[in-house]
Amino acid sequence: MNIQKVKLGSQGLIVPDIGLGCMGMTGFGDADMYGKTNEQEAIATIHRSLELGGNFLDTADLYGPFKNEQLIAKAIAGSRDQYVIATKFGWEIDEHDQVTWKINGRKDYVKKSVERSLKNLKTDYIDLYYMHRLDKNTPIEETVHAMSELVQEGKVKYIGLSEVSSETVKRAHAVHPVSAVQSEYSLFERTVEEKGVLQTLHELGIGFVAYSPLGRGFLSGQIRSIDDLPENDFRRAMPRFQDQYFHKNIELVKTMEDLASGRGITSSQLALAWIISKGIIPIPGTKRRTYLEQNMEAAQIHLSDDDLSRLESIVPPGTDTGAPYDEFSMGLLDY
């Protein structure tokens, strides 16, 4: 498998053209993010990714909290320099390791967060450090200035933002060059396109990383009924998976599957190849080697102009597939 290495932004960061989202490899509190977890298989998945040329791992202090970073530390032990590690801060986690469900972008919290992540990852530097959500009570300039100091100190190589508007990106980039913005993006979720964020990133030479590129699993074709989701799966609370949208979304996926089967590929591979064709880095999440290998094969698929136009006609921009989050979480996005 020949995974291409590409520039992410214009500050020098090089990554494979498909990454690995690690969130689902650990649970969150008493809940599982995407069904049952298996640490041994998760670590094997990370190692298999590296064997295939995929060394870009995405995590966050929120996931667990901390369990995900700690899992990655185990997986990369002895080979840290072979991986590009991205993690995030911003969701406030108190002294008792409890998430307060507030966003904190103050300078002192940025400094505290990075030391915690370095410890949990068992590393002395983070390749790409994202602000997970915008703290609407703290000027973005303060947050980014603190992140800039981490770069100067050698604790962070490159900085990023997540789920932010064009205006926030411009203000942040004026303080310190931003290498990447990460937001949800898939055939089912194109807000960053519709709001002009992708255009702003292109103009400023900032890379874009797409999380949930398979629509939280919908575009994989593995979900045919809400009962296909484990009882404590967090997706059950998302509007996209509620009755008013669920059946309509299934029909869209079935039409995509027809197009994919005509090419001899899966609907997942079609959805990922569509994102890669736009020069965007998808980070599909999986905790199993089987799905990892299928996902990485998507980077080898070339879609013709006809393929792309047919796909766009199935799910054109503006298609309402349901909000990606509940009302509280939607209120934390910067759009």
Image (cartoon, helix red, strand yellow):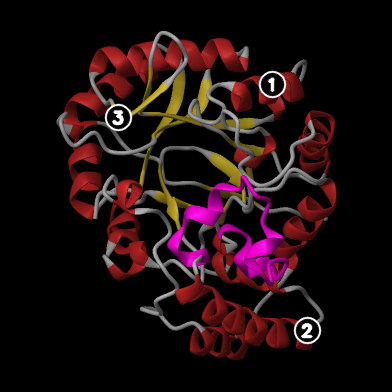
Which residue, given by chain and number where applicable, does mark 2 sit on?
Answer: 261
Whether label 3 touches label 1, CB < 8 Å: no
Q: Nearer the viewer, residue 5 or 120?
A: 120
Q: Residue at x 29, y 48 (%)?
A: 164
Earlier in the chain: of badge 2 and badge 3, it is: 3
Question: Is residue 227 shown in magenta?
Answer: yes
Q: Could you say which quadrant of the image residue 255 lies in? A: bottom right
* Closer to the eye: label 2 or 1: 2
Residue 80 circle label: 1
Residue picked out by circle 3: 102
- Taking the spot 35% from the left edge, 28% from the top edge, the residue there is 90
Residue 137 tag number: none
Q: Amino acid at mark 1?
A: Arg
Count neighbours of disc 3 (C-alpha within 10 A) and say few if under 14, some if 14 to 19, many if 20 or more: few
Q: Amino acid at mark 2?
A: Ser
Q: Amino acid at mark 3?
A: Lys
Q: Earlier in the sequence, mark 2 or mark 1?
A: 1
Whether residue 36 appears in magenta in the rendering, the answer is no
The percent coordinates of residue 168 (x first, y second) are: 21, 45
Location of the N terminus (image quadrant) = bottom right
In this rendering, the answer to whether 147 lies above or below 192 is above
Which span is picked out in magenta?
216-241
- Judge from the rendering whether residue 44 lies leftward or rightward of residue 156; answer left or right: right
Q: Residue at x 62, y 79 (%)?
A: 253
First reached walking from the N terminus: tag 3 or tag 1:
1
Q: CA distance from mark 3 to mark 1?
A: 32 Å
